[in-house]
Amino acid sequence: MLLKVDSVSMSFGGLKAVNDVSLSVERGEIVGLIGPNGAGKTTLMNMIGGVYKPTSGRIFVEDVEITGLKPNKICRLGISRTFQIPRPFPDLTALANVCIGVLCGKTRPHMSYTEAMLDASHFLEFFGLFGKRNTLARDLTLYEMRALELARALATTPKLIMIDEVMAGLNPGEASKAIDLVQRMVEEYHVTILWIEHVMKVIMEATERVIVLQYGQKIASGPPREVINDPKIIDAYLGEKIA
């Protein structure tokens, strides 16, 4: 088991955003995390990534407890992520942005910036961004920014990448390219994916298992087609059956 989340809760004042959620992710899986807006998906991801310390519960990566650790320490243990709204360093080039990922994730303390640039160039090429290596991040298109988010996450050499709505705002052609990139990441770099997504076509095509949150609680887990066509899930989230 790569990731274990054991009965975690997160409260903000009187609001319980996540309520006693447990889940596990096996190495090599692509797991979808779905639910209506406000269900607690990103809050859960923020707890795993160290942005929030859970009010209660524990989180483990393999046999190492990461509950409450800072994001940089969690990154070095092999957990990386993207953001729903891309968060590059806007005044740095695409190459420099990925270099930061390389230097933050590697455990080689004496790695030079030149070595990091070589690694970063490789990741930019993998994501089709090598031609944009000297372009400032703020001047990239939305699709290119999302590809840059994936490149930075992969550059940390993670075991698990948490993806937060990478499809948001993309047209169908761009979304298909993004799905292909994620699947290639899994195949070629042997990473595990925990993926928040609202586009059901993506969930059906790309994930092997789906976890559903509602009002901060886990209400279902299983194969995508089985879960998405469950009458309880239709009523709670989808509104209609998926063909």
Image (cartoon, helix red, strand yellow):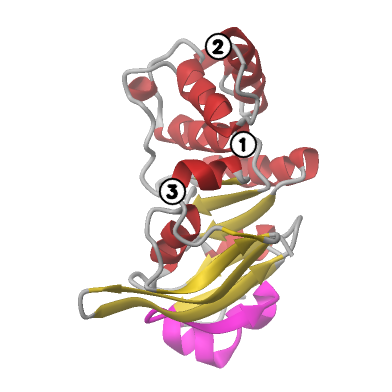
Dot 1, crowdedness within 10 Å: few (<14), some or many (≥20)?
many
* Dot 1 amino acid type: Leu
Q: Is residue 142 above or below residue 100?
A: below
Question: Circle 1 sits on which residue?
Answer: 154
**Of residues 231 and 162, which is closer to you in this image?**
162
User: Residue 29: x, y in percent?
Assistant: 73, 59
Is residue 236 found inside the magenta-colored segment of the image? Answer: yes
Determine the CA span between mark 2 and mark 3. Answer: 24 Å
The span picked out in magenta is 214-239
Task: Report whether 58 appears left or right of 15.
Answer: right
**Mark 1 vs mark 2: in front:** 2
Does residue 205 appear left or right of residue 242 in this picture?
Answer: right
* Residue in front for this viewpoint, 130 or 89: 89
Give the residue pinned by disc 3: 70
Q: Is mark 2 on a helix, strand or loop?
A: helix
Q: In the displayed structure, does residue 127 sit left or right of residue 19? A: right
Q: Residue 113 carries which label?
A: 2
Question: Residue most toward the left?
Answer: 13
The amino acid beneath tag 2 is: Tyr
Q: Where is residue 198 in the image (x, y as percent from the top left)?
A: 47, 63
Asked if the stretch drawn in magenta spans residue 1, the answer is: no
Horizontal and vertical percent for residue 219?
52, 85
